[in-house]
Amino acid sequence: MDKVNIGAVITTPGSALNYKTGSWRTLKPVLDEAKCKFCNICWQLCPDSAIEQADAKAKKPIKIDYDYCKGCGICVQECPFNALEMVEEEK
Amino acid sequence: MGVKQVVKGNFATAVAAKLARVDVVPAYPITPSTLFPEQISTYIANGEMDAELLLTESEHSAMSAAIGASASGARVATATASQGLKLMSEMLFIASGMRLPIVTAVGNRALSAPINIWCDHQDTIAERDSGWLQFYAENNQNALDLMLMAFKISEDRRVLLPSMVGLDAFVLTHTMEGVDVPLQEEVDEFLPPYKPVYTLDVKNPMTFGSFGTPAHYMEFKYQQWEAMENAQKVIDEVFSEFYEKFGRKYEKVSEYRTDDADIIILTMGSMSGTARAAVDSMREKGIKVGAAKLTVFRPFPFREIKDLSRKAKVLAVADRNISFGFGGAVFAEIAGALINEKEKPMLIDFIIGLGGRDITQEDFYKIAEISKDAIDKGKVEKMVHWINLREVQ
């Protein structure tokens, strides 16, 4: 029998990393890297920490972590530069 | 030994919380339990109690705060009643599911509508399935003692479930009675500090209140079921340890003049003393009647009820609650407990004392009369009776 802690307490911090939850998605945000101005607004507003921060000095645009992105579209809605668009997830 | 004081029921539960060295009391006042947080506040202001009193904006918040405080390893108590317990209801299930040994005193009060502030057991009975242990006090001494024992039972590693201690609205909460208040050193010996299995700690982060998918949810519920089963034994152990230390005897089911009884009247809470007085009066007239009192409702004392059931021809259950479409909850539990017994008494349910209607000896005479009629006829013609009901149209 599996051991489960009483009260469903999880004693290992960060264990959510063991589970990929991106498969729930039906639409996904896709970045046009040339349009990214490294403002990080999408990074701030992503409810799931599924966006890696852009680095303005290194001219490194944001990156979407599709293992966790649920496809909510907030980043697409909020990007001031239309650098992101929602596209249908391929099955 | 302790100090004899003449106190109200709410004082008895508050002094128990003080003696238990409770760390956090999140509270929202509601009649008839308001004197509990008032008394805690007085203790803290006087420097008699080292605790945090959190005055929240609702009972839902009070129980939420209790959950957070308990998860951080604090010993937590609160008090509520009636509509307040209903507003807590969502969080009650979370407290038990997270296995947090919070103790709540409930001034048992009727539920709206119509609004009513007086006694019945509907509020706690409606939380029967919340995963909390349930104790019912007959008097203020019971309220104090059960509150103290509730911490010890709830915090036992074999249990780790929250407890509610019911004390009847006004009949106990606001009535002065002589109570033996134990000394602090006696309580300290009886009740060691709470040692949680897991605690919220920034240096050692853990996830509390996690997601339980279909792959695991049932196992967590099974653990709660097992803990409640374990509580049967732990309650007996704690009752017996309490008796050795303080000399006051507690039983899940206490019997009175039941040995040669044809009829046993089963009660819960403050009506139990009236039932025993009625038994004495009826015994003088030669009626073979006894009384029994249920102190523990969850976990349900199956073994004790089975033993009791073998002693009488009729088990008459006085229910200060009503489950519409069925009958009284205590009656329902007893019927369930006896279902596989080869020999069982006739069971009759009596709905009594709702919304603070006085329960008198005459009510118990009536119950005995109806029970006697069933014995004479050899059958129960009507399963649920309402006692002392006015004729209404």
Image: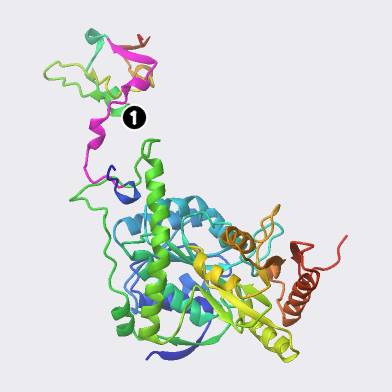
Q: Nearer the viewer, residue B53 or B135?
A: B135
Q: Position of residue B133 (x, y in %)?
A: 46, 63
Q: Quadrant of the N terminus of chain B?
A: bottom left
Residue B45 shows in this picture: no
Q: Position of residue B228 (x, y in %)?
A: 42, 59
Q: Position of residue B100 (x, y in %)?
A: 37, 57
Residue labelled with disc 1: A47
Q: Please tell me how crowded label 1 is: few (under 14), some (14-19), or many (20+) other residues with Cα within 10 Å.
A: some
Residue, far front: B342
Residue B208 shows in this picture: yes
Q: Is residue A46 magenta?
A: no
SS under mark 1: loop
Colour scheme shown: rainbow
Q: Using the image, name the chain to which the residue with label 1 belongs.
A: A
* Residue at x-position 35% and y-position 50%: A7
Look at the image and give the residue range highlighted in magenta. A9-31
The quadrant where residue B339 appears: bottom right
